[in-house]
Image (tube, rainbow, N blue to C red):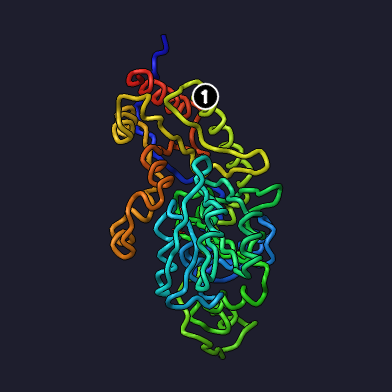
Amino acid sequence: MMIPSVRTSFLPFALPDIDDAELNEVSEVLRSGWVTTGPKVRQFEAAFAAAVGAEHAVAVNSCTAAMHLALHAIGLRRGDEVITTPYTFAATAEVIRYFDARPVFVDVDAASLNIRPDLIEAAITPRTRAILPVHIAGLPADLDEIQAIACSHDLPVIEDAAHAFPSRYKGQMIGGLSDFTCFSFYATKTLTTGEGGMLCTNSSRWAEQCRIMALHGISKDAWKRYTAEGSWYYEILAPGYKYNMTDLSAAMGLAQLSKTERMLRRRQEIARCYSLAFADLPALQLPHDRPDCQHSWHLYTLRLNLDRLRISRAMFIEELKQRGIGASVHFIPLHLHPYYRETYSYQPEDFPVAHREYAREISLPIYSRMSDGDIQSVIDAVCDIVSIHRI
Ligand SMILES: *Cc1c(COP(=O)(O)O)cnc(C)c1O
């Protein structure tokens, strides 16, 4: 009989992978006397652009900021529509609302939980201005199909790639494949700067415009102004935002970037261990993967087959907690939240797949700092709960 290992400490749902590399990079910045946007940000932008194969990368303080700047760059206005998915985090749709524009949700594919291209086509109206797909969990959305639709309607594609570093779509890194790709370096993401984000584009005009809007709409940044290379003169070209990344964050980002391969390999290993261990449990549906893509494994998303369990999803998470395992749910679809429900009079069944899949989803811990013992304790806990409560 299998005796589940008992954890002596709680395993958090997510933890950043930080060691001396980050400490050294950040202390170098602290000692340098230049702590805000400067040489480290430029270095991080260049290194990140090279890593994802984008012509330009503009470092900002969040993915939310990056998406806001992208929608500003395309000239989104009040009353316009942007097609996106309800199966995502708050940020994806709120940036559309910043313009008094309408997020037009279309349902997701039941297997991948990514936006369904055939439903995008049907949702296009004369007011549609952009398509904003999300690569949920780090598994790329159907970019070929999405871009074909975008192209035939002359619409830009803005990718919410908050989960998608380092993901590949048919061999190519996510980052240089659409008009804009927006990454998140939030604390729980696959590369973290504490808070941070990156806007990638292959258009020099859009990159320059976003760079200016990210720092007050000013035509030169402070670094150039206050060093020997620059001058005191600047011009305000538009009422911009305060979205710049600091050199402190960029230093952390550079250290994280150099660990990309190792961190990815470890997450892939964890995903493999989980999927191998859970493959024979009819109560569980394993996360979707595609052989023609590279999954970043930001999230490991199980779906419970609730007709094969005596307990609810909430109780499953509670039982994991009792065994010392942190778990989460990704995501509560946006149309179920009071703001969107009340503003647009949504019913849960308006996006039936998002609603149904959300109700049985559980995300397990998956991060490079997990030890082999941590992985085993997650597996033991899940198998134990299933064996006790299966029908
Ligand atoms: C984390 C996340 C964001 C927001 O990223 P921030 O850097 O915190 O602004 C956007 N979209 C999705 C899908 C996310 O998970």
Q: Position of residue 317 (x, y in %)?
A: 33, 34
Q: Residue 82 or 51: which is nearer the viewer?
A: 82
Residue at the top extreme? 1
* Residue kind at label 1, given as amino acid type: Ala
Q: Quadrant of the C terminus?
A: top left
Give above or below for 376 relative to 152: above
Q: Residue 157 or 375: which is nearer the viewer?
A: 157
Q: Residue 139 or 127: which is nearer the viewer?
A: 127
On the picture, is 319 further left or further right than 91?
Answer: left
Q: Position of residue 196 (x, y in %)?
A: 49, 61
- The residue shown at (64%, 62%) is 178
Q: Quadrant of the N terminus?
A: top left
Give above or below for 329 relative to 45: above
Can you see residue 28? no
Q: Position of residue 319 (x, y in %)?
A: 31, 29
Crowding at label 1, few (<14), some or many (≥20) Cα neighbours within 10 Å? few
- The residue shown at (44%, 37%) is 365
Give above or below for 333 relative to 228: above
**Image quadrant in which you'd find residue 40:** bottom right
Give above or below for 188 relative to 390: below
Can you see residue 391? yes
Q: Residue 84 or 327: which is nearer the viewer?
A: 84
Q: What is the total number of numbered labels drawn onto the structure image?
A: 1
Q: Position of residue 274 (x, y in %)?
A: 51, 29
Q: Which residue is mark 1?
A: 279
Which secondary structure lies at badge 1? loop
Q: Is mark 1 within 8 Å of ligand 1?
A: no
